[in-house]
Image (cartoon, rainbow, N blue to C red):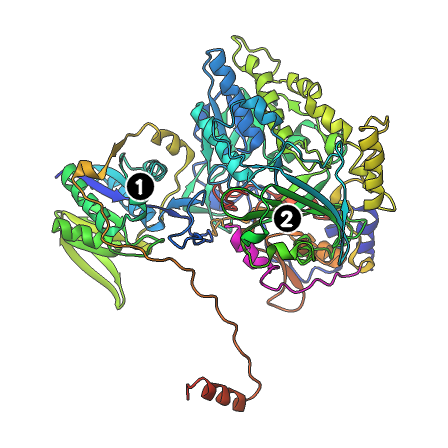
Amino acid sequence: MSGRVLVGVKRVIDYAVKIRVKPDKSSVVTDGVKHSMNPFCEIAVEEAVKMKEKKLIKEVVAVSCGPQQAQETIRTALAMGADRGIHVEVTGKDYETLGPLQISKIMAALAKKEEAQLIILGKQAIDDDCNQTGQMTAALLDWPQGTFASEVSLEGDKIKVVREVDGGLETIKINIPAVITADLRLNTPRYATLPNIMKAKKKKIANMKPADLGVDITSRLEVLRVDEPPQRQAGVKVETVEDLVSKLKEAGLV
Amino acid sequence: TTPALKTVQTEHAAPQLYTTLHRRKCSSVSTPRITTHYTIHSRDKDSRWEGIEMERFADEADVVIVGGGPAGLSAAIRLKQLANEHEKELRVCLVEKASQIGAHTLSGACLEPTALSELFPDWKERGAPMNTPVTEDVFSILTEKHRIPVPILPGLPMRNHGNYIVRLGNFVHWLGEQAEELGVELYPGYAAAEVLFHEDGSVKGIATNDVGIAKDGSPKDVFERGMELHAKVTLFGEGCHGHLAKQLYKQFNLRENCEPQTYAIGLKEVWVIDEKKWRPGRVEHSVGWPLNRNTYGGSFLYHLNEGEPLVALGFVVGLDYTNPYLSPFREFQRWKHHPSVAPTLEGGSRIAYGARALNEGGIQSIPKLTFPGGLLIGCSPGFMNVPKIKGTHTAMKSGMLAAEAIFPKVTAEGLDSETTGLHVPEYAEALKNSWVWKELHSVRNIRPSFHNYFGLYGGMIYTGVFYWIFRGKEPWTLKHAGLDANQLKPAKECTPIEYPKPDGKISFDLLSSVALSGTNHEGDQPPHLTLKNDSVPVERNLAIYDGPEQRFCPAGVYEYVPLETGDGMRLQINAQNCVHCKTCDIKDPSQNINWVVPEGGGGPAYNGM
């Protein structure tokens, strides 16, 4: 039992920022825009660090895939308590087409390389809202998955996961090694305080490329166009019920 | 008016005096608690804080700089340049409340590259984002329907030949990259919340903000103390009206021999416009409409040359305005409809919005700049050249001079100071002998010259005669009118202004504008707009001045809403909207609002503003 947990952290546009579509409609403007760690990834890091503090696991490794700036996100995870980081460098066009399938291949390769027992990811990223990486990673590794976790407890060689599902809460017990994806109510992430940011500078971040892991990151998807949602049209106020009925008739709705 | 109100009107009495009288008269309506911040309600006597670990982790640096703006970064860079030149080790730490360097920076801006060329003669090779040299310079006086062009003759302060239109946020971000390369430790996302003192009263350093305090002032599970950064000398570069500087003025009596600072608020938007209307390098300034001749202010519109057809435009209103019904935001919105402005914006779309207060006091308002353990740099003490509307070059130069003055002292073998925190009066001397002082001296009378019956026109005539012809060499120095907060007339003496409704294409409402600033704060924290006295807003600001904070805040932080029980109003503070402009702390007629720094990382997310 290696006692090692891999946590994936994604650098996304901050949730409070108003995004803008590029004039060429290829994607969203990211230059100079405020970015931060995906909120669900913060929860994932917190869960892993909590497990380490309870001495249930030995080491937390934070992983991020992306350009140079992804290292800032890894540093934040290190400041929250992760022990070391892995930066898988993906830049330019490759980064623009990087999606859940490629990430899960990378995570699976890393899990094998690092002999990880547990992978904790956020349930989804707030930029693409895919909700796929955790599930795909589990499938590639043939590991059980506990997704939308609102409670996680290690019980010997199994994990009990309480999942938030449409019908309510579902409790499952799965074998280790496993993939967990964190939902909102799993925990409240701690702040990355300045002394910890300073200490995190001394923690190691390993650099590698997807090719080093034997992963081909060519995308099978091509984004044709990105558009802003249509402007909400003004409503029409009517004075009487007769007016309402005639307007509905005009629109062919009655 | 009741006798209590009269007392306040005649004496501008301290709010405490007023409420003591008032309580005897009618205190059946109790004010709901608004302020929960520990700077107003100490945690020492608060039972919820019993047993909470309040020890702070401390670290030592040679120099600590508060504020990652042009002044702070220039000082940091200059220090490291000197350290490398002289092969000395120097630990320079810079804390900045924005989540990334440049995210709280907002300015027009036309940068005069003088200070930059001194700091980095090779700034072009280093890739400084100076992509738009000024090619056209236009100045106008606007009336409601027309535009009167004013020739910008060589020698007038607003001439921009040789300057660059920049997106200052991007420029500051680039300065941050240069600083990091030189080995400066930059810590964005951490706000300096407290000044620390040695036993001998000199400044020891700063402490960053605590995190994890709930809205009601109690500690949350994730509560953690801020960190102490100790230094031999601390540079304070918080920008216009810094909150720590406010404390330092009192602590060291730095303002006893200068006039109070006077300010303006600048609101800004960035638009992508129709390519056919785009004239990169064009600089437009106007005065006049929609402001009346006794309200100082004007507009700017700059065409950037950075690939996309972008324009940066905005409006400045002097905060010595007298009508409490004036809304700087709405003046800005209606100015855009002027026939000389609207065509440029038609067919375009707005992509950014923000606001910030700026200094207008000039040389008359510069306080004492040094004190044991620290110095003030940049717009914090205030080196803005008002008629040029430029303060970046002087801010940078002040940072560089500060670095040059403190370098020999912080690297000296022995401690050459009477106090544990270094006192470096050489910095003030160097500044007085530099081009900054000469420049500010020559324009010192232009802004105060607006305080005459003819207002704007008197001021322009004065500028024409005494600056253009005599280069500011007249032997007298005019005074400002006093504190901006004291200039408001009671609401009943003024007429409400009829502002047009925003059309959603050229002009917009406040809340959609605030959303564009990307501002946000952790919701569950004590409001950082603290009130010394929670009952003063309704009892004084609303009663006498009709709540001017509802109008001068460019982010909709202050709202007077009806009380849930009974009749009467209460002040609602929407602290999450705050864009850190500092206007409320400046313009509150009761001087009851004390802006303190919220949890680091909060505030606007400006991108190249």
Residue at 32% of width from left, 52% of height from top? A125
- Residue at which label 1 appears: A66
Q: Mark 2: few, some, or many residues within 10 Å (few <14, many ≥20)?
A: many
Q: Mark 1: few, some, or many residues within 10 Å (few <14, many ≥20)?
A: many
Identify which amino acid the numbered label 1 is placed on.
Gly
Please tell me the numbered disc located at residue A53. Answer: none
Q: Secondary structure at mark 1?
A: strand
Tally of numbered discs: 2
- Residue at which label 2 appears: B314
- Which region shows up in magenta? B495-518
Q: Quadrant of the C terminus of chain B?
A: top right
Residue at 19% of width from left, 44% of height from top? A216
**Image x and y of residue B41, in percent:** 58, 44
Can you see residue B23?
no
**Image x and y of residue A144, in percent:** 14, 53
Q: Quadrant of residue A253?
A: bottom left
Outermost residue to the top: B413
Residue toward you, B567 or A20: A20
Outermost residue to the right: B453
Residue toward you, A138 or A155: A138
Q: Quadrant of residue A58?
A: top left
